[in-house]
Image (tube, helix red, strand yellow):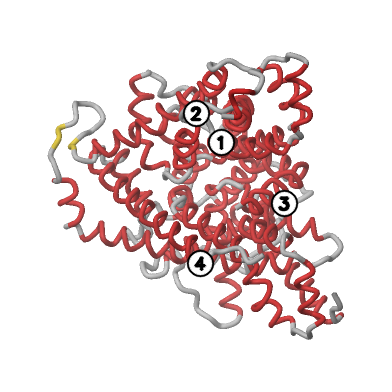
Amino acid sequence: MAQKQKYKWHSWATPWILLFPTLVGLFVFRLIPIVSSFVLSFSDWNLIRDPVFNGFQNYRELFSDPDFWKIFGNTLKITLGYVAGSMVFGLLLALLVNNKIKGMNFFRAAIYMPVITSSVAVGIVWLRILGPKYGIVDFILKKIGVTAPYWLQDTNLALWTVTFVQVWKMAGYYMILFLAGLQSINKDVLEASVVDGATPVQRLFRVTLPMLSPTTFFVFTVAIMDAFKNFELIYAMTKGGPQNATNTLVYSVYVNAFSYFRVGYAETIAWVLMAVVGGLTIVNFYVKKYWAQPLD
Amino acid sequence: MVKKKSSRYVILVLIILASFVSVFPFLWMVSTSFMSEDVIFALPVRIFPNKLFKAGMWDNYKTVISKYSFGLYTWNSFVISFLAALGQIFVCPMASFAFAKMRFRGRRWIYALLLMTLMIPVQVIIIPEYYLMMKLGWINSFLPLIVPSFLSGALGTFMFISVFEAIPSAMFDAAVIDGASAYKILWRVYFPQATASVATLFIIAFMNNWNDLLRPLLYLNKARLYTVTIGLTRFQSEYTSSWALLLTASVLSILPLIIVYIFCQRYIIENQMSAGVKG
């Protein structure tokens, strides 16, 4: 090995000393909790007395509960809506701010601003904006003769309203990721296509988007992971209601564990969530292998 | 590239529209904080405040700070976010330096495990973590919100691995030839070379901790320990109809971050862009 002939500039223990806090954190706050939560998903527990292991009873109860399937469906819907919405708006915004216009940094910073503010504050201000009668949206709709629906009280609409706010908050983030991809595209290819007489639309669909595909895939992966981070907004806007209309897996883990103290049952839901995330990761892996090939 | 003038105007209009949609909720939040309650529940809906530059302009702010102790919540959020961010800027470069510059057994495994933890939703690990904090007697203290930040941060570690790998190896070789220890090379050569990244990681960690809700909600049950995010949700559930006070509290809760953002947005956005290119 070439390593052996090198001058030894550190002892064998040095990397372990440097990694010591990280390893403690990795085991104590990540790996051990992951394994324990799996084990506890087969138990009846309330955090105080010892857990009673009851086999697959939690899973049986969960899978035969219609509320659970509702929550599961909500999670899939919000994920789908969030991933589609944030990718479409992220890309459109990136295409817009990729132009050379004076003061562009200001506009980028403005569009990125919701990303850095807390979901709680964002949720509260959108409650006001979408509020019945005194909210600005309902007021404008009434002016143009449209009766506004109940954005957050209608059980069919509430979930999409929350998804919309989540997309609104995070669009700037995906804009920046797409923008980085757009700016790393080889300019010569774009110029060659102009010389060859490609229209702007052709250039977008035949050159820019295909060359952007590694970025698109990266954004896709990030968006899926972020789609599950909806606890805060739901907590601030709907608390999962009305009638579970906006309840998701992440929110129902919290409610079951810390409001109903059904901790074992909450862990069961957490592991269903884990299975969904794991499944999506595997899908991602194959998509990356067969689809997102760099085109240079 | 040649572009028609008219299409440039269309683009400009769309960009202004997008910026407006992004910023309007915050403007209205600030505007509402200078309104009195009766104006909020009056039609037509008002965009501009009625108390701005008039007597009693700061009434809502005074009430929220003195009567509902948002000053204290802001301080609590600051202490927690500052210390947690401080932990990150020390622990992440240490781990990154080992990954970037050293070869040791199990390196790939530890790297893969760290990468995997990025994908685990917090809800999967939070219950055992809560139990641990309960057994340690750390509930109702800031420790559960600070100590984990001194023990690993996967995102920061990956950020610094690429920063360290980009530093020219000539500097590294010179330091080794001079006989500097590994720790000296890290803290005296590599760390000072990466100040922009250190600042960026600090800001990002600060913001994430400032905005966190789940952990403060679980670990802080006494009003004097509340952070701004819990203060805001508690306030929301008690005074649902008081929009003026609620949005004033919201302004206070996001104001410190907005100020930091105005000065540091370039670094935050550039860091985000480099993450995008790497992907």
Is residue B241 shown to the viewer in this render?
yes
Give the residue type that dot 3 points to: Lys
Are discs 2 and 3 both within one chain? yes
Q: CA distance from mark 3 to mark 1?
A: 34 Å
Q: In the shown orientation, is residue A184 left or right of residue A142?
A: right
Mark 2 vs mark 3: in front: 2
Regarding mark 2 in the picture, which secondary structure is present there? helix
Quadrant of image for the N terminus of chain A? top right
Is label 2 in contact with label 1 (beta carbons under 8 Å)?
yes
User: Which residue, given by chain and number where applicable, does mark 4 sit on?
Assistant: A291
Above or below residue A93? Residue B185 is above
Residue that mark 1 sits on: B209
Q: CA distance from mark 4 to mark 3?
A: 58 Å
Which residue carries the number 2 mark? B145
Residue A140 at x, y = what percent?
61, 74
The residues tagged by marks 2 and 4 sit, at their Cα atoms, a distance apart of: 41 Å
Residue B198 is left or right of residue B83, and the answer is: right
Three-letter code for the amino acid on which mark 1 is drawn:
Asn
Q: Chain of mark 3?
A: B
Quarter location, residue B255? top right
Q: Nearer the viewer, residue A137 or B77?
A: B77
What is the distance, in whole Å, between disc 2 and disc 1 at their CAs?
8 Å
Q: Amino acid at mark 4?
A: Trp
Please tell me whether mark 1 sits on a helix, a strand or a loop.
helix
Q: CA distance from mark 2 to mark 3?
A: 39 Å
Instruction: Estimate the x, y position of residue B112 in percent, counting from the top left.
Output: 47, 39
